[in-house]
């Protein structure tokens, strides 16, 4: 049975009439045309679908729409502000942290969640914070560099 779910996505209020069990990812992609979050494994194991719900990184492919009632959701599309990329988005570009880019939005969203809690992450912190995000191209060292660069930028030490 369909029900109306109200939530905020990238700062805008949305109401969606859909089954509460439907995945957040399918609503974002199919109903709201926000296609930055990718469908990878469908089991919450690869991280390609990662978005922020109330600031916490979650796997949207296994998150039911009904769990999102009244929540603040941020997708990769919501990170850019006034024509400026988020420092982590820019760092991914600057360090060449993406190859095929299928994992990139999920990696960035997990990285943003990490940086919101830890402004000076060590390499070990970054590895733990990005755990569960899989890059099939193997750009992990560049992803770590990107998170470090973004951390420095957010603290005012980077360009």
Image (cartoon, grey):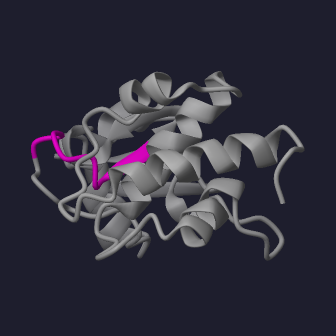
Q: Along the horizontal axis of the image, is 51 left or right of 14?
A: left
Residue nearest the viewer, comparing 24 with 41: 41
Query: Over which residues does the magenta segment extend?
Result: 43-51
Residue at the image point whose x is 25% and y is 41% from the top: 20
> Residue 14, how many percent across, how many down?
54, 57
Residue 66: image quadrant is: top left
Q: Position of residue 35 (x, y in %)?
A: 38, 73
Asked if residue 48 is among those painted magenta in the image, a careful observer would answer yes
Q: Quadrant of residue 10?
A: bottom right
Does residue 34 appear left or right of residue 158 in this picture?
left
Left or right, 134 with reference to 76: left
Q: Is residue 54 visible?
A: no
Q: Is 71 inside the magenta-drawn segment?
A: no
| Foreground residue among 89 and 74 | 89
**x then y, percent, for residue 116:** 66, 31
Image spot of residue 111 (x, y percent): 51, 42
Identify which residue is drawn at 42% across, 29% down: 129
- Residue at 38% from the left image edge and 31% from the top image edge: 127
Task: Tell me the quarter of the image containing the C terminus.
Answer: bottom right
Please say if 30 is above or below 58: below
């Amino acid at each position: 049975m369909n029900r109306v779910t109200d939530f905020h996505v990238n700062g805008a209020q949305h109401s969606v009439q859909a089954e509460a069990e439907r995945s957040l990812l399918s609503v974002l992609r199919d109903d709201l045309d926000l296609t930055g979050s990718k469908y990878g494994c469908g089991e919450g194991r690869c991280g390609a679908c990662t978005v922020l719900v109330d600031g916490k990184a979650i796997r949207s492919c296994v998150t039911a729409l009904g769990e999102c009632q009244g929540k603040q959701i941020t997708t990769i599309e919501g990170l850019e502000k006034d024509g400026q990329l988020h420092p982590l988005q820019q760092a991914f570009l600057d360090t060449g942290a993406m190859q095929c880019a299928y994992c990139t939005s999920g990696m960035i969203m997990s990285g943003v969640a990490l940086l919101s809690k830890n402004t000076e992450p060590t390499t070990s912190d970054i590895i733990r914070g990005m755990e569960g995000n899989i890059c099939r191209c193997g750009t992990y060292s560049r992803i770590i560099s990107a998170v470090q660069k973004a951390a420095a930028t957010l603290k005012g030490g980077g360009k």
